[in-house]
Image (cartoon, rainbow, N blue to C red):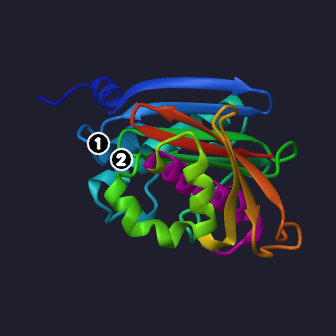
């Protein structure tokens, strides 16, 4: 016998939380890849982009969870449209007048957004803690020797500090992409300051990315931890 629609929905979305702070609205959920099925897109009123039609189950599940959180955020902001498109860098395309960011890992999806008239840059990223052996393999592509010194001076174990730096750079890309309009890599900015007490990293641009985003421009990436994950966000 088929399960009722409500049960299917409840099993996929395990838990939801919302936050309202100043100009921002945030929705977060825990979701279950195991309980995902393609028909949930129809049941939950979300379309499947052609770019992920043939994707694996994990990719479809995380996409759906993120877009469901975006729907809720946009409804709270009184948007007449709750559809968020997908761009060439898999970036979300928001309804006119709104700006936001979406992130997800294996079991959590987060969306935060606000009005374009009140905010210029929004980026958020969640990452599982990167293990020390993987850090050693990839660190040369993510941080410079100078950044490594900064991270090792932080009162934090290096793999966690590195994960935060990696996540902060992902958040920066998401925050700036709609202005820059093109891909830029991890070398475009560096971590120049790390405050455990105030829970933020400061990033400085090393390249001119746009007339409004020149080398020397700084951004604060705030961070939080959730179980074995970290997330960072940039809001201006």
Q: In which quarter of the image is the N terminus?
A: top left
Look at mark 2 in the image and give the residue it sits on: 61
Upstream in sequence: badge 1 or badge 2: 1
Look at mark 1 in the image and give the residue it sits on: 33
Residue 21 image position (x, y, % from top left): 74, 26
* Residue 125 left/right relative to 75: left
Is 91 contained in the magenta span? no
> Closest to the observer: 139 or 124?
139
Label 1 sits on a secondary structure element that is loop
Q: Visible in this render: residue 45?
A: no
Residue 151 is tagged as none
Tag 1–tag 2 contact (CB < 8 Å):
yes
Residue 233 image position (x, y, % from top left): 65, 44
| Picture residue at 83% right of the left edge, 62% below the top | 217
Residue 110 image position (x, y, % from top left): 53, 39
| Secondary structure that dominates the magenta span | helix
Q: Looking at this view, name the residue that lies furthest to the left.
A: 1
Is 176 contained in the magenta span? yes
For the magenta stretch, what is the residue range?
159-183
């Amino acid at each position: 016998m088929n399960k009722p629609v409500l049960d299917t929905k409840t099993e996929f979305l395990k838990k939801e939380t919302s936050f309202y702070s100043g100009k921002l609205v945030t929705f977060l959920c825990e979701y279950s890849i195991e309980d995902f099925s393609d028909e949930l897109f129809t049941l939950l009123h979300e379309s499947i982009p052609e770019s992920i039609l043939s994707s694996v189950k994990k990719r479809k599940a995380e996409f759906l969870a993120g877009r469901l959180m975006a729907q809720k955020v946009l409804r709270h902001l009184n948007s007449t449209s709750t559809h968020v498109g997908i761009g060439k860098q898999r970036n979300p395309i928001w309804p006119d007048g709104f700006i936001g960011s979406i992130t997800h890992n294996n079991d959590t999806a987060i969306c935060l957004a606000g009005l374009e008239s009140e905010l210029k840059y929004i980026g958020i990223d969640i990452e599982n803690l990167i293990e020390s052996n993987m850090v050693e393999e990839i660190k040369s592509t993510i941080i410079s020797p100078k950044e490594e010194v900064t991270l090792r001076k932080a009162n934090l174990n290096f793999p966690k500090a590195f994960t935060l730096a990696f996540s902060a750079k992902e958040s920066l890309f998401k925050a700036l992409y709609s202005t820059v309009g093109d891909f830029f890599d991890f070398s475009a900015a560096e971590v120049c300051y790390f405050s455990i007490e105030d829970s933020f990293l400061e990033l400085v641009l090393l390249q001119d990315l746009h007339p409004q985003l020149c080398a020397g421009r700084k951004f604060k990436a705030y961070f939080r931890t959730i179980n074995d994950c970290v997330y960072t966000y940039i809001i201006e």
